[in-house]
Amino acid sequence: RRDAAFPAELLQTPGALPAGAKVAIFVLFQARGIAPSTLLTCEHLASQGYALLVMSNAPLSPVDRQALAARSWRVVERPNQGHDFGAWRDGIRLLRHFGLIPERLVLLNDSVWFPLVEDDSLLARMETEDGFTGALWMERPGRVHRAHFQSWLTMFGPRALAHPAFRAFWDGYLASPRRASVLLRGEKGLSRAMVHAGLAAPPLASPALLLRHAEAVDASELARILAYAALTGPVRATRDRLLVDPQAQGFHAAALALISSTLMSGPVLETHPYLVAQAAGLH
């Protein structure tokens, strides 16, 4: 039904910036007003040559709508149907509606602060790939079928955009209100489809690569990684005991063991933001 009426359910506001060969679809859900960091993300994308299509899953105030339009090619407000993957699907269909065929496409959402510094080079480094890539590849030992790029920032190069698997995934994707379904069929399903098509590029960061980075730093940097880690319960108590004296004998091995266990068992970005920023070059 929504596809038949498309794009009637979308409230569109033309932006001040032109369309271009590089496009970023930025999904927002900020029902209480747009954060200043979101505007910085828009400005960064524009500075990197991306025509920005903002997809808001919550209504925007006139002030926020104007602020976003000044920094983008188009601002769209839509019902919050299908979370970020539903919005990305609508955004990709909207590009087709306007006859826009990008050479490079970035999909991102507002679940993280990006960039962390003004001269961030992450997008430029991702642009060296012509397939499908992302900022963080999630993998668990013995669970290869669940490995995937986290969807807060992914990129499709020319080879991926021209491949039938790209269109097949988005045309066949059914938006769901259930977060578990979005994670399984959206985030993991997208990576699975791109991997099967031979389009997935090597990751910039993954639990294994993060651990390798931690193994190469000194005790003071290990202590900083642990200090910034978001831990709870007995694991946090263990961390706190270790941080009492980072120069103590055995600290290095114990710290690495703790970092390894939390990397392989929990949400990496949320647990180790400092380590991810350092290892992936986001600082």
Image: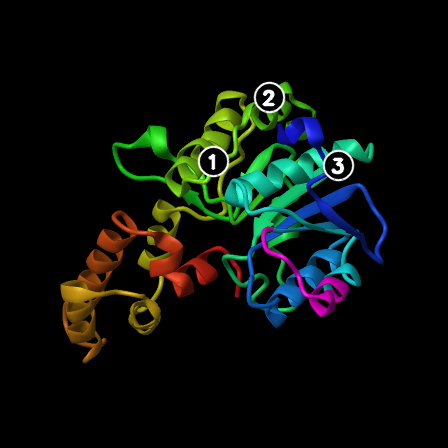
Residue 3 in percent (x, y) is at 65, 28
- What amino acid does circle 2 point to? Ala
**Where residue 263 sits: x, y (%)?**
29, 52
Instruction: Say if mark 2 contacts mark 1, CB within 8 Å.
Output: no
Mark 2: give few (<14), some (14-19) or many (20+) Cα within 10 Å: few
Residue furthest bottom as drawn: 244
Q: Nearer the viewer, mark 2 or mark 1?
A: 1
Dot 3 falls on a residue whose secondary structure is helix
Relative to the observer, which residue lies in front, 120 or 6?
Answer: 6
- Give, as a three-letter code, the residue at label 1: Ser
Front position in the image: 166 or 77:
77
Q: Is residue 213 left or right of residue 74?
A: left
Answer above or below: position of 94 versus 18: above
How far apart are the alpha carbons under marks 3 and 1? 22 Å
Which residue lies under the disc numbered 2?
168
Residue visible at 56% across and 61% down? 30
Residue 210 in magenta stretch: no
- Estimate how packed mark 3 is, as few (under 14), some (14 to 19) or many (20 or more) residues with alpha carbons within 10 Å: some
Q: Is residue 235 visible?
A: yes
What are the residue bounds of the magenta stretch?
57-67
Q: CA distance from mark 2 to mark 3?
A: 16 Å
In percent of width and height, residue 144 lies at 33, 30
Q: Earlier in the sequence, mark 2 or mark 3?
A: 3
> Mark 3, mark 1: which one is toward the viewer?
1
Label 1 sits on residue: 176
Mark 2 or 1 closer to N-term? 2
Q: Which mark is residue 95?
A: 3
